[in-house]
Amino acid sequence: MSHVTDDSLLTRRTLLNRLRNLDDQESWRTFFDLYWRLLYNVARKSGLDDPGAQEIVQETVIAVARKMPEFRYDPARGTFRQWLLRITRRRIVDHLRRVYRQPLKAEVAPDLLDEEEEHAAAITDQSASAIDRVWDEEWEQSTFDAAVARVRAAINPRHFQVFDYCVLKGWPASKVAATLGLNAAQVYLAKHRVAQAMKRAVREINDERSQGIMDA
């Protein structure tokens, strides 16, 4: 599995329309590469172990695949981000309920089972709210990662190296200048150019990802 790559960042509407063809393996591979890490990280941070998170990724992709043949673009019915969140949240909450209730039926007396299942429902309701918060955080991180990949592929490698050291690694400008054999002005200009490119890339990716989609 790999991080989001620059060349796979297609216009969302174009990609989603192509996904209506379930035999279009290239488009489905692109979709998976774009979103698997987001889905996996949200599941993990919602309390699932690695096998559980992998299962959520698989179930979510399958759910999307089932809905795509009838897909019709309609921005009035919400964004892709909201739609994918609803699908993912539903799978995670269902998984947590299964995990929580499985030992209950074996270990809890019948007269206490209803009470314990109500407690399980309350816990998973709380988890649903937490999933929304984690989703927002992970979505922003995945957008940033995608922007980094896009800018790295398009900009002067030397300039990106300055940005990498200054911003991503947090090095002081003096250390960057000494390491790369540059002066302070060159470091500042390179960092500024890449920062501007990053802002544009983030805007573009957010625009691409804001394409509307049908209800879950």
Image (cartoon, rainbow, N blue to C red):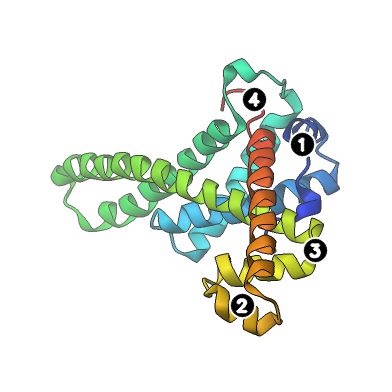
**Furthest residue to the left?**
111
Q: Position of residue 44 (x, y in %)?
A: 46, 59
Residues tagged 2 and 1 counted as in contact (Cβ below 8 A): no
Q: CA distance from mark 4 to mark 2?
A: 43 Å
User: Vertically, is 164 above or below 115?
Assistant: below
Residue that numbered label 4 is attached to:
212
**Can you identify the residue that label 3 sits on?**
156
Of residue 79 and residue 145, the one placed in the foreground of this image is 145
Which residue, given by chain and number where applicable, does mark 1 sit on? 11
Question: Between disc 3 and disc 2, whose residue precedes?
Answer: 3
Q: Is residue 87 visible?
A: yes
The Cα–Cα distance between marks 3 and 4, rounded to whole angstroms, is 34 Å
Residue mark closest to the camera, 3 vs 2 = 2
Q: Earlier in the sequence, mark 3 or mark 1?
A: 1
Could you tell me which secondary element the residue under label 2 belongs to? helix
Q: Are marks 3 and 4 in contact (CB under 8 Å)?
A: no
Residue 62 figure quarter: top right
Q: Is residue 76 left or right of residue 111?
A: right
Badge 4, how many Cα within 10 Å: few under 14, some, many 20+? many
Looking at numbered disc 2 in the image, what kind of residue is underneath it? Val
Label 3 to label 1: alpha-carbon separation: 24 Å
- Report x, y in % for residue 25: 84, 47
Mark 2 or mark 1, whichever is nearer to me: 2
Circle on res. 176: 2
Left or right: residue 49 versus residue 192 is left
> Image point 67% across, 28% down: which residue?
211
Give the amino acid at mark 4: Gly
- Give the residue drawn at x 78%, y 50%: 8
Residue 192 versus residue 138: which sits nearer the camera? 192
